[in-house]
Image (tube, grey):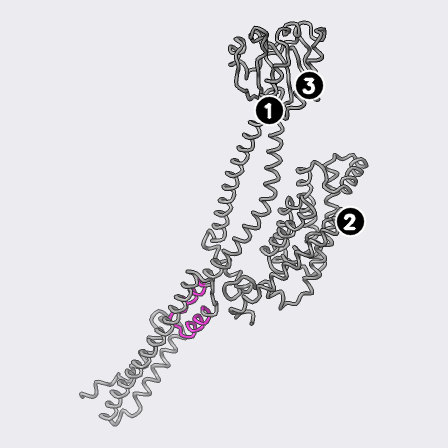
Amino acid sequence: MHKDGKSGRIYKNRPQSILFVIACIAANVLMTFEADRTGLPLFLDTAGTILVSLAGGFFPGVITAAATNVACVFFNEDALYFVVVHALIALLASWYVRRFSVKKPAGVAVLAGITSLFCGVLSALIQWGLYGQPQNEAVAEMSASFSQATGLGAFAAFLLVNILLNIVDKGLTVTLAAVIFSVMPESFLEKIRDRGWRQRPLSDNEKRDLRKWSRKAGFSIVARSSISLMSVLVISVTIMGVIVIRYYYGDEKEEKTKNAQSAVAFAATVVDGNRMDDYISSGWKVPDYEKTRQMLQKIRDNSPGVEYLYVIKVREDGCHVAFDLDTQDVPAYEPGDVIEIEKAFEPYMPTLLEGGEIEPIESKDKSGWVVTVYHSVKNSRDQTVGYVGADVSLDYLREQMSDFVFRAVLILAGFFILILSYQMTITAMFTLYPVGSMALCVEDLAESGDDQKKLDENVKKIRKLDIRTGDEIERLYREICDMALNQAEQVRSIRYFADTTAKMQDGLIITMANMVENRDSDTGAHIQKTAAYVKVIVDGLEKKGYYPQKVTKKFKSDVVRSAPLHDVGKINI
């Protein structure tokens, strides 16, 4: 199997490629597990990924990255959040090796430096967004010490420490991968690179020519299909995310609202409605005030989601406080305090003043995003004398949704890169390379004209592609092969008939010329000499550049071959 003429044997390289990727995944996981077990502030999880990216390109590199993080979930539950970092490192390494050498120390150092800076910054941002602090305890201690020593903020200190640690981590992993890559046999690397081809693998020069040809098309197949796939993925995930969040938010709000309704209904039975005015005017002086307040405290503490619980009487000038329970962040109103009516409650004031019941009210005010539930407090004559109110804070839902979206984006981004890499590889192998290779060959075939040698060479070149996509493209390839062969054979047949006709024509001319010689014994070899002189003249005209548009190859042939007939009129004389 030589470099320019590989055939179906390329498919036998797949098991070797798969085993190579599995071995690198295992190496990543083992090194990461050992670092995690010993508490090292390093991950050491990218050596195998970088090696696969250097040897086989971005797609197997991204597979190695994603599989490594999925496997690491068994001992590090947060590993999935860093798939995107790992996948981007694979893309970076595969891009770098296509443009620069990693078989020299300088090239390895540059790759290690770029990777360290990139990974240090991105992983620091992810850790701070997820936990608000470093993930590793040792790194947290170093960052705190560095912050105290330099006066930098907590995040700035952590960012610098994380970059320095990544210089060590990526310096080790990149160097290890580069050393192994430099000693790998070229034959093995060739097998790794040749996996997945559906035709004869193209050389670097052929790929370069194909990229130039593809750029002439304006918008490539790979770009169009990649944008289409990403659009579908993003739209689908966004729609599903919105649906999930809305259902989650709705269920949570409904559950907490029901808890609040149960709490205010129970609290309303605890408060003595006959003493409502005494609670407001005298407060702590009322004999059972403290006991009632303690019972309300227990009700609030045992009602999940209820943050504020209070008893008020609604009047024209505002809400008069009877009971208001302390919270961690907001001090309680004292009995008799008057709270201004908030805008969200203004439409319900007539109903509240009349002592009627209202539905839960969702609002955003100085207390935050809350759902307020009221239940009337009645006296012994079944008259509404006040309301027990409970506020369910929904601010935690916003925080939970933001955290959920952030985590989901991190995980999905890594797997989006994997899906996009797979799609780009499949499109290139099954569509771009076969179609582009056929197009270049057809262009060469069209430019061959009636040159039999070039036609035969292009037929061999097309058949040498050996496209095996197993779909319409392969069928098109077979048809093009047949068309090229038929064209070459037709030109060959036409050339044969033309040559035969020319020989017959030459024979006729010579016969007629001989008739002239036979009629005139003085002519002698004059006919042949005349033809020779004519040839010398037209060759001289061509050499001197006279009449370039007139003196063509065909014109010269016709004149020289017709020269023997210049005395044909002597036959009659």
Q: Is residue 236 above or below residue 62?
A: above
Look at the magenta stretch and give its main secondary structure.
helix
Would you name the residue on which mark 2 appears? 38
Crowding around mark 2 (Cα neighbors within 10 Å: few <14, some 14 to 19, many 20+) is few
Residue type (three-letter) at the residue carrying disc 3: Gln
Q: Which of marks 2 and 1 is nearer the N terminus?
A: 2
Residue 292 occupies which quadrant of the picture?
top right
Magenta span of residues: 438-462
Foreground residue among 286 and 100: 286
Q: Which of marks 1 and 3 is nearer the N terminus?
A: 1
Judged left or right of residue 504, residue 101 is: right
Report the residue at 41% width, 72% height from top.
455
Is residue 76 placed above or below 54 in the rendered structure? above
Instruction: State the separation of the CA atoms marked 1 and 3.
Output: 15 Å
Percent position (x, y) of residue 441? 44, 65
Q: Which residue lies furthest to the bottom in this view?
A: 521
Q: Mark 3 highlights which residue?
A: 297
Q: Are marks 2 and 1 in contact (CB under 8 Å)?
A: no
Place of residue 31 in the rendered image (x, y in percent of width and height, measured from the top left):
72, 54
Residue situated in front as seen by the camera: 93 or 237: 237
Residue 446 point in image, percent of width and height: 40, 66
Q: Which of marks 2 and 3 is nearer the N terminus?
A: 2
- The residue labelled by disc 1 is 259
